[in-house]
Image (cartoon, rainbow, N blue to C red):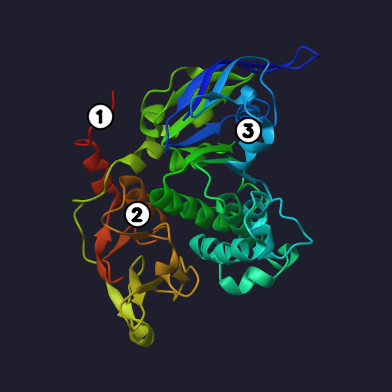
Amino acid sequence: MITFENVTKKYPDGTVAVDDLTLDVPEGTLAVFVGPSGCGKTTSMRMINRMIEPTSGSLTVDGKDVTQVDAVKLRLGIGYVIQSAGLMPHLKVVDNVATVPVLMGESRRTARKNAMGVLERVGLDPKLANRYPAQLSGGQQQRVGVARALAADPPILLMDEPFSAVDPVVREELQTEILRLQSELRKTIVFVTHDIDEAIKLGEKVAVFGRGGVLQQYDAPRRLLSNPANDFVAGFIGADRGYRGLQFTPGSGLPLHDVRTVSESGVDALDLGPGEWALVTHPDGSPYAWIDVNGVGLHRQGKSLYDSTIAGGSLFVPDGTLRLALDAALSSPAGLGVAVDARKQVIGGIKADDVVAALKNRPRTT
């Protein structure tokens, strides 16, 4: 779908932003360009829709050289999401989303009607459609930006550090939303970020760029972690790349240990010794918080421990990964990750030692 062949971008002052880039983004793939500031990742992405013109080499989209395609026509067929959404402040949300379809000749009435459906697809309440961007939270604005990019149903989506301006919780929600949308729509996506964790979480393929716009490695995330191409890639990923690699190993089959539980109404009658912990549960049986002999409740996230959508806060779903299992165990004051079933009921505890033992039998990537 998108192919770079020996593409270079050199500015008149001699600065080389992208140096001899060769890579292919297959149709339906979410590829992430990652690297430090000034490494050419954003420049590479912007050459796809000709916001920046390549100096040399060949860049094709669907087999057509982008330099031979009308720039406006090219861009109308490519969705584009930027940091801080880039919404037009004088237009209501629904009209922001309908912008590209209207530019492509669709009637405003039809475009607005279809925009409502796209807003729901990205997880926004239709009641927000008649608000202005300034009346939305940062996370809501970013969802509108994604909706606008999807409104004309383009086969390609370019995303330029779209979540870097929002807080970590909202960023996590938006990342999960992108993965959900991609599983449904299978767009060809090029996503730019400086965050290696975001790259590994989202990317089916990850391109690591180095100084001077040189591509250092282009691989599946699991191989990137297990087989970094050079010292630069290993250093950029970080010393804990082995821990990150656990997210590609299923956590199913880990032994479950007994967890002492107590209902919220029974906390006052709880008898705990020094160093002992109990798990407080809601009336419906879902976990709420850990409590010790001093009555200290920890790891409360919102109204329930279960509200953590990433299985953090000592919570673990058995079909999760070893990374989530280890994180659950390590983040628990009791040393037990809380395993729950599909009904949010506590089914046992996960120990870090069991995760380490499971590593001995995990498949090795060559």
Position in image of residue 2 (x %, y %): 50, 28
Q: Earlier in the sequence, mark 2 or mark 3?
A: 3
Provide residue 44's location: percent of width, then percent of height.
61, 27
Give the mark, 2 or 1, whose residue is nearer the N terminus.
Answer: 2
10 Å crowding of disc 3: few (<14), some (14-19), many (20+):
many
Q: Quadrant of the C terminus?
A: top left
Name the secondary structure under disc 2: helix
Q: Which of 155 and 344 is in front in this view?
A: 155
User: First in sequence: mark 3 or mark 1?
Assistant: 3
In the displayed structure, 224 sits above or below 161; it is above
Which residue is tagged 1?
364
User: What amino acid is at disc 1?
Assistant: Arg
Residue at image location 68% in from the left, 50% down from the top? 103
Q: How far apart are marks 2 and 1 (CA)?
A: 24 Å
The residue mark sitting in front, 2 or 1, is 1
Secondary structure of the residue carrying tag 3 is: loop
Check disc 2 and give the amino acid type.
Answer: Ala
Which is more toward the observer, 272 or 154? 154
Which residue carries the number 3 mark? Answer: 49
Q: Is residue 335 shown left or right of residue 299? A: left
Q: Is mark 1 on a helix, strand or loop?
A: loop
Name the residue tied to disc 2. 329
Mark 2 burial class by Cα count in 10 Å: few <14, some 14-19, many 20+: many
**Rendered location of residue 290, percent (x, y):** 39, 69
Camera-near label (3 vs 1) is: 3
The one nearer the camera, 270 or 206, is 206
